[in-house]
Each structure stands twice: as structure tokens, then as C-alpha cells.
Image (tube, rainbow, N blue to C red):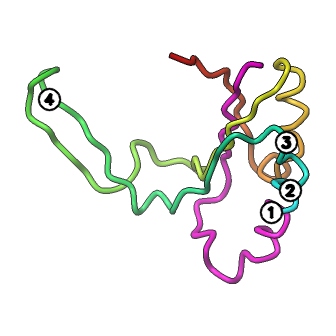
Amino acid sequence: MPLYAALTYTKDVDWTLPEFGQEMKEYNEFGQGAAAIIRGGNALYPTATATTVRVEGGKGGDVVTSDGPYAETKEALTGFYLLECADLDEAVSVAARIPAAWGGAVEVRPVIEF
């Protein structure tokens, strides 16, 4: 069966903090309910912890890093699930049950397996 990445976009917060306990409970409930098709995934720390890497001049050029995300946005990429589904319709149906879809967004993409 094909794999789909379900990328979650939500408010840019530290999901490990106690004030997000109720929301994390909802994610855990989703994970338990969809365990048969989840093949991986995790939450990400806030974008303030990101390091953006660029290579100036292309391959072999100078490596330049900057603190923070590549782009500033209202909603940030905050996690992902790797789902094994029969088709895109099933992946979309599952993505609609991810709590991020209720107040943010979930982007579903097919995965190229090498």
C-alpha cells in the first residue's frame, strides 16, 4: 500500500509544555485510533529552535546557517505522520481526524519510496 506524509501546521508552540496537555491528549487519542496505519511520525519543537542551512554557490560552496525557520508564517510545520493507506481518499479521511486539521491544516503528500 502507498505511504502518505500528513504534515501538520498549527500554532508555533512547544507541545511539551503542560498547558497543551488537553490538545496532546487529543493527538494521543488519534494515534491510538489510527495505530493500524501509522508508520511513523513525531511532533517538532518550535521554529525558534530551527537552523536553516544553505550552500552558497551550489554544491561544494560555503555552508551558511541561520537561526530560525526558513519562512515566518502564522502557522508552522509542527509535526508529521507517516500513513500507510489504500489511496489518497483514505489518507484524506484519516488526515481529517488529526487535531491539527480542526484549527490549523494538514497537508497530505504521497511518499516516493526509493
Residue numbers of the magenta segment: 1-27
Tell us which disc is closer to us: 2 or 1.
2
Quarter occupied by residue 54: top left
Q: Inspect the image, locate mark 1, and give the three-letter code of the amino acid beneath it.
A: Asn
The residue indicated by pointer 3 is 36
Q: Is residue 54 above or below residue 101?
A: above
Q: Nearer the viewer, residue 77 or 1?
A: 1
**SS class of the residue under badge 4?**
strand
Q: Inspect the image, locate mark 4, and give the three-letter code of the amino acid beneath it.
A: Glu
Q: Nearer the viewer, residue 19 or 39?
A: 39
Circle 2 crowding by C-alpha within 10 Å: few under 14, some 14–19, many from 20 = few
Marks 1 and 4 close (CB-CB < 8 Å): no
Seen at 70% across and 25% down, the residue is 3
Q: Position of residue 105 (x, y in %)?
A: 74, 42
For residue 26: magenta?
A: yes
**SS class of the residue under badge 3?**
loop
State the mark number for residue 32: 2
Tell us which disc is closer to us: 3 or 4.
3
Seen at 89% across and 45% down, the residue is 97
User: Is 101 situated left or right of 14 in this image?
Assistant: right
The residue indicated by pointer 4 is 56
Tell us which disc is closer to us: 4 or 2.
2
Quarter occupied by residue 55: top left
Seen at 61% across and 53% down, the residue is 42
